[in-house]
Image: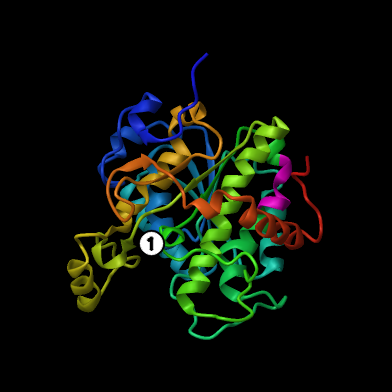
Amino acid sequence: MKSAVRYGSLLQLGHGDALPSVHENRSRWNGWGAGQRALVTGANAGLGYFTSLALAASGAEVIMACRDQQRAQRARQSIEQRVPGAKLSILPLDTSRYDSVDALATQLAEAELDILIANAGIIHTPRQRQEDSSGAELVMSTNYLGHARLVGKLAAQFQQRALRLITVGSMATHILPANPQNMQLHHGYSSYRAYAQSKAALQSFGLGLDHRLKLLSWPARSITVHPGYSLSGLSVTIPGVNEPDFAKRFIGRLQSGFAQGKHQGAVPIVEAALNPGLDRTDHGVYIGPRGISKGPAWLVKPANLTRRKRLLDPVWQMFIEANDGRDPFQL
């Protein structure tokens, strides 16, 4: 009996190591996505765009779920130029609005997803605390609660299929620990804390769900990743999609010793979605740059708190509340 892999090089998975960027890995991933259908939230820019580009090049059908339909169309055209014959479609999604999430879930009910990438979110968070239409803190709503509701609505597919959910966490969880008693930041709000706590919630949920799926003996997996410190200013120029100005490029160069481009940060996401060897990993696996902020994709350790019941309990309760008091993964 083979022991499950948890930490270390991707070489352990039997398919070699990934190269530094999505462009360099095109031949590696070629064919891995054939016959698979992937949903990428926030697919029109940044990590979501480069992930969608890589998945399309791998042969997967990609559903780009985006809030801004005009930007989504530009991203789709850009991918089609780079991947002749790409199988792409666009559906509207605003993760801060439950009616938008519900509409998408209805459209996907019969879609038979193989990959669901929970990527959409607010990076440039508001300076003052804001709420969504339901009264939830806006950053938490956008980055975690909307995805939590979408997963809940699609839970039947987790029971029926070897679906992979990829939750995109953050290195911020290593820097600023979440406060399990103040997840909605009713006091002590700051823009960075709002981002870090929302990512801690999504990361903790992803890790916890993978263990829950094992206990349920369902075929799906929940793989959690983080992209390191990935900047637009260090990303390759994509006309109409990623065109950072001089200031962003200059700031990117100043931080290049510990930062990377989003075309590099997307590599752990695509590996989590496609690498066949991940079936050999232990539940609760986590993929990110070896050097935390940058470096080759590696099986790494998540922030301790995001693996603890102390955070998972309130995060799971938020998941239940986001699904109208229902726990579709109840043991």
Image quadrant occupied by the C terminus = top right
Answer left or right for 282 relative to 237: right
Using the image, determine if residue 60 lies above or below residue 228: above
The residue sitting at the top extreme is: 1
Residue 134 image offset from top left, x and y in percent: 72, 75
- 162 vs 71, left or right, is right
Residue 89 seen in this snapshot: no
Give the quarter of the image for residue 311. bottom right
Residue on which the image places disc 1: 46
Q: Is residue 100 visible?
A: yes
Residue 77 lies, with reference to residue 193, above or below; the image says above
Amino acid type, mark 1: Gly
The local secondary structure at tag 1 comes to helix
> 263 or 83, which lies in front?
263
Residue 131, percent from left and from top = 64, 80
What residue sits 31% from the left and 28% below the top?
A: 16
How many labels sit on residues? 1
Q: Which residues are magenta?
A: 151-156
> In this rendering, would 3 be left or right of 186?
left
What residue appears at the point 41 percent right and 35 percent down from the top-left corner?
A: 7
Q: Position of residue 87 (x, y in %)?
A: 47, 45
Q: Nearer the viewer, residue 79 or 16?
A: 16
- Dominant secondary structure (helix, strand or loop) of the stretch shown in magenta: helix
